[in-house]
Every structure is written in structure tokens, then in C-alpha cells.
Image (spheres, grey):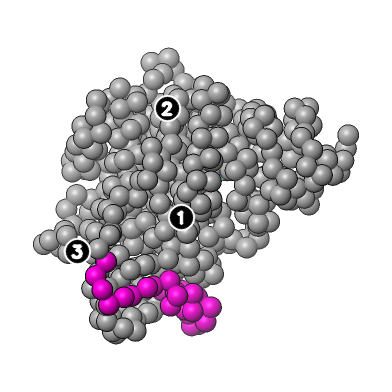
Amino acid sequence: MGIVDLIKKKAKGQALTEDEIARFVEGIVDGTVSEAQIGAMLMAIKWKELDKKETRCLTRCMVNSGDVLTWPDKWRGSMVDKHSTGGVGDKISLVLVPILACCDVKVPMVSGRGLDHTGGTLDKLEAIPGVSVEFDIDSIKSMVEDIGCCIVGQTESLVPADKQLYAIRDVTDTVDNNSLIASSVVSKKASENVDFLILDVKCGKAAVIQDEAAAEVLGKLMVDISNDIGMRTMALLTRMDHPIGLAIGNSLEVVESLRCLRWNCPVCSDSKKCLHCRGCHDILALVYELGGRLLCSAGKTQTLVESRCLMEEKIRNGEAMNCFKKLIVAQGAKQEVAECLCDPKTDFWAGLPKALHSKGLKVEQDGYVHDIDAFKCGKASWNLGAGRNKQVCDIKMGVGLELQVCLGDRIRKGDVWVTVYYDSDTVPVEVEAMLNQALVVKDQELTHTNGSRVVKV
Ligand code: URA
């Protein structure tokens, strides 16, 4: 059967055989299936679905489309990683990876770029001048040997099928499908050949799969396929209704990640009142939840409390920041740039691309912050140029948003609640309108701020 027949078959809702899925994936990699045909097949899959057998087969074919990393026996049992299904302000990997690498585990992270309104770890990392995310297998192995971690992308030799599919899904409205998400996530992680994997499966307004029950189904599918491949995998279901932390946008999120890796905030005398500290607490809570479970799984700690203490210690003693510095130098940043960027006494902006302009949007009434809609914030940032609308597209590294309030805060008319960073002459009208709808202020206090985003393990 030719590729057009395969597309027709899937569009009619019929199951593809293993050979047919293998033929499709091979065609993606050797160029015999065109981008238009890939897009058509993705749309057919989105609407007619793959069953579990087809999804498992697609995942395996995607893993086999490239090489699988191999590791020395002495590291077996200590290779770990985490992956998120995508969030707004989700800079967890930038913070978690260097911390874990200081806790006697190895983290060979293969990550992704922005998808839809959600940001991507690779795009954020590339905001740092000189940093690259494309490496050959030998360089990846050396980084893991020398530093204990890396954060790289799919390449011609590492899950090349996902590299193609991921980019085409981003611009063809085919992101939100369980089988496509599962095969994309699990194939990347299987190519890393890690022992333990934790999945952060998002649900809520700004998640790719919004409904909690549907996200749970996705989590179970990924855990099953992943365990089947030989990675011991668990999933946390976490809420993605409000942005994680304060910053949304590539450079802005690098800065906030570095704030998380600095133990002492230079501006605050009370971390419960300091805006930046409260943003960091939100991020670190998730870092400890996810990292804590990985450390227990790898036998480095016995309890989540012990894991948290160990991770806090690695931030407090500067090891985690130092590891981040080594990571970005290994991935191409100049030593001087990295030294300046990671200096805890600075504001961390050294050398990072900045937007041309900024503007504070003001609150229109007194009251308490009841909602900051992460989807609208994510879309606004995407509209400013932080994400892509076609496959090959330069994104703007400096643009984005910085929240100036947290959920539950008391605010007054005229206070700035968000700073918009933009490169155009003015803040685009649709961005301002979207942001005005993102903030919900009410007279009464917000009583139910449940501190944790985790809804299910
Ligand atoms: N992360 C991935 O790697 N792939 C997806 O499809 C979604 C999130």
C-alpha cells in the first residue's frame, strides 16, 4: 500500500498494521513521505485515533528511527529523567536537571520545543547566547560523563521521526491527541535509555489535554507503554490552570529558573511577601515533588522529605547553580557569559536577549486575585512572538510576560498586575484584550488556594 492509501485507511478509522506504521515512520525519516502527507496522516490520527497496539507500535518505530544511547554498567540504576506534557511558565526542567545531577544520578534529557501555547525547554535554553541543543551521540555521552546531565533535542540520529512529527504537529493543530503525545514523549525517553522516568501529566485550562479524567487516561497510556519498553515509569497528574511561577517567555523563564537555583534572594527580607520568592516557591514545589520521587526510585533517598532536604542542600551550597553553569558551557555558552549569567549577586540578565519595550497593565478594580488564566497568558506570549506559527520560524527570545501578582493577592485599582515585554511598536491589541480577560479580581478573599498543583500520583 502506498502512503496515500495508508492515509485513506486511517481516515476511514481502520487500524494500521505494524508494517504499515513502520512504513510511515521510515518514510518520514528517509524523506519519501512528504510534509503534506505527514500532516494529512497526523490529522487522520487525531480524528480517528490509534488504538493501544498501534500507539505502542508507533512508539517503538519512532525509537528505532534513530540510535538508542548506551551507558556504562556502573551507572545502571541511576539514570533518571522527567518529562512534562507541556505547560505555561513550565521551566521545571531547567531547574530540576542540574539539581538532580548533583544528587548522584545522571540525567540525559532529550526535550522538546514549544508546542501550541505551551513553551519548550529547548527554546528557553537557546535564549542563552551560544547555547545549542543539537549534539551527536558521543558529545551527549561526554556531557553526561563530565557533568552528570545534558538537555538536548531530537537530531538526525536521535529520534529523528519525533523531530519531524513534533515540528509538523505544532503548526497543524495535531498536538492534542493521546497517541501522538504518548509516542512523542515515550520515544524520546526510550532513546535516552534511562532506568526511571517520571511524567508530569498536566490537566486544566492551559494543558494540552484539559479534562482531568482524560489526562489521567493519557498518563496511564504513557506509563503502560513506557514500562513495556523497560523504563520504570510513574506519572503525577498536576493542575495547569495558572502559570507556573511568574515568568512566561524564553529569556524571562531562564532568569526565573536561575532565581530558583539561588538560595538567598538579595532583595527580600521576608520570602512570604517577596514576589520573586513566591514565584520560586511555586516552581520549586513541583521540582521537589518530581525530583523527590526520582531520587527515591533510584535508591538515593528513602522518603520524599529526605529527597527534598538533599535537593535544598544542593541549591544552598551552590552546587546546583554551578552545575547549570557547566551545562550551558558544555552546550556552547562562552565561559564569561555563563559566569556572569549564573552569578547569584546579579539580576541574571547578563547577555540574555531582552525585548525592545515593556509595559505594565493595570488592574481596573480593588479586590483579590481569583484567577490568572494560564491559557490566555500562554496565548498572549505566543502572540508576542515567543512561539511558532510555521515550521521554520524565528521566535523572539526576549518577549513574554512577568506577573506582578500571585493568586489570592489583595490588589488595588491602578496596580500593575503584569508586565508585557514586546518587540513591536505597541502591545498588540489582541494581546492586551486577552490579558485583560486573563485576570479575575473579586471583592471577597480567595479562601481555597490549595498550595499544591499535584492532584494525583
Ligand atoms: N511533550 C512531547 O515531547 N511531546 C508532546 O507531544 C507533548 C509534550
Residue 28 x/y as whole percent:
74, 40
Is tag 2's residue or tag 1's residue first in the polypeptide sequence?
2
Is tag 3's residue or tag 1's residue first in the polypeptide sequence?
1
The span shown in magenta is 420-446
Residue 339, above or below 407: above
Give the residue number, with chain letter if any, for mark 3: 274
Question: In the image shown, does 49 or 447 lie closer to the viewer?
Answer: 447
435 within the magenta span: yes
Q: Quadrant of ligand 1?
A: top right
Residue visible at 50% across and 46% down in the picture:
213
Residue visible at 47% across and 59% down in the picture:
205
Give the residue number, with chain letter if any, for mark 2: 196
Is tag 2's residue or tag 3's residue first in the polypeptide sequence?
2
Question: In the image shown, does 300 or 437 lie closer to the viewer?
Answer: 437
Name the secondary structure under disc 3. Answer: loop
Give the residue number, with chain letter if any, for mark 1: 204
Say what amino acid the circle numbered 1 marks. Answer: Gly
Q: Quadrant of the C terminus?
A: top left
Name the secondary structure under disc 2. Answer: strand
Residue visible at 61% across and 51% down in the picture:
175
Whole-number angstrom distance, CA of label 2 to CA of label 1: 26 Å
Residue 409, above or below 185: below
